[in-house]
Image (spheres, helix red, strand yellow):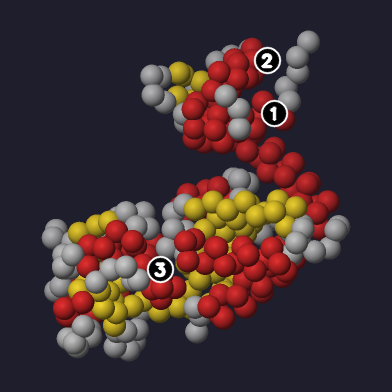
Amino acid sequence: MKTLTMKHLRYFEALSRIGHFGRAANECAISQPALSVQMKELEALIGAPLIERGARQIRLTGLGDALAERARDILRAVDEIEDLTRTSQGALAGRLRIGVIPTIAPYLLPGLIQDLNTQLPNIDIWPREAVTRTLLNDLMGGQLDVAIVALPVSEPSLHEEPLFDEEFVLVRPESEANLPAPNPETLREMRLLLLEEGHCFRDQALSFCNIGTKPPRDLMEGSSLSTLVQMVGAGIGVTLIPEMALPVETRAAPVSVQRLPAPRPSRTVGMIWRKSTPLAGQLSELAQRVRQFGKSQYGQ
């Protein structure tokens, strides 16, 4: 006779969070038919339907919603038990699930992972790139151990550890290289290219220009900093990017770079983790290593 297992809960939690059999199966590293079999088995064990199966996505029943919440609590507790065993080993070792926002990940992660692998040879870094809200949900849900984001995030259950500050710089067409750097009022009148909604960097740029959360109708958006810089190179407008992105994004685009007048826009890059995690001590030590690396590369 089959019984409820941790595997059932992990698969169901992934499906409830992602809402799609194919993508959930990919995350769980199993086939879609195998995941479907596991979910039917779970429903048989529970004795009631948990999932409403649609053509493109799934919905949870009322019982499914309640079970998903309880499953997340159970899985988080189990993960923290595993973390307790890791703390007994002293230095951070084993799998480290780290989330990073898109305006930091491509520029910080490659060198940082190489540096950490040298300093901490027993660590196995599993990176994930996503916008801040997604990382917060995954962190609080136990799918991540730690995240690198722009502070503050102001979530009571999370510890915030500042790492370093970095400035934003103005990128404008190469033909405008000799023009004076605009102040926020002048910049507000220019065609400003920004990341699409959901990126915290967009909100920081709007705040600097004192535009507010509802930008002008002629403001243009892009899905990545690379897209924005290429649009600037085509003469479409101007944009702001973090200083760490400069070597990568401006090397193949006909653009010029200017530092803005004081007070210059900037952000605080930091690490966040659950206050309840047993790995807090090791993560504090990790933060110090990341802080030293970040300051040596980009920080002030």
| Disc 2 to disc 1: CB gap under 8 Å | no
Residue 292: image location, x then y, percent: 62, 78
| Crowd around label 2: few <14 · some 14–19 · many ≥20 (10 Å) | few
Which is more foreground, mark 3 or mark 2? 3
The answer to whether residue 135 is above or below residue 149 is above
Q: What residue is shown with label 3?
A: 248
Q: What residue is shown with label 1?
A: 7
Tell me what residue is drawn at x 63 percent, y 38 percent. 72
> Which amino acid lies under the numbered mark 3 shown in the image of this protein?
Val
Looking at the image, residue 201 sits to the left or right of residue 16; the answer is left
Tell me what residue is drawn at x 25 percent, y 74 percent. 255
> Which amino acid lies under the numbered mark 1 shown in the image of this protein?
Lys
For the residue labelled by badge 1, is the local secondary structure a helix, a strand or a loop?
helix
Tell me what residue is drawn at x 73 percent, y 22 percent. 4
Q: Foreground residue, 216 or 241?
A: 241
The answer to whether residue 213 is above or below residue 4 is below
Q: How far apart are marks 3 and 2 (CA)?
A: 53 Å
Residue 36: image location, x then y, percent: 56, 19
Which is more foreground, mark 2 or mark 1? 1
Q: Which mark is residue 45?
A: 2
Residue 257: image location, x then y, percent: 29, 79
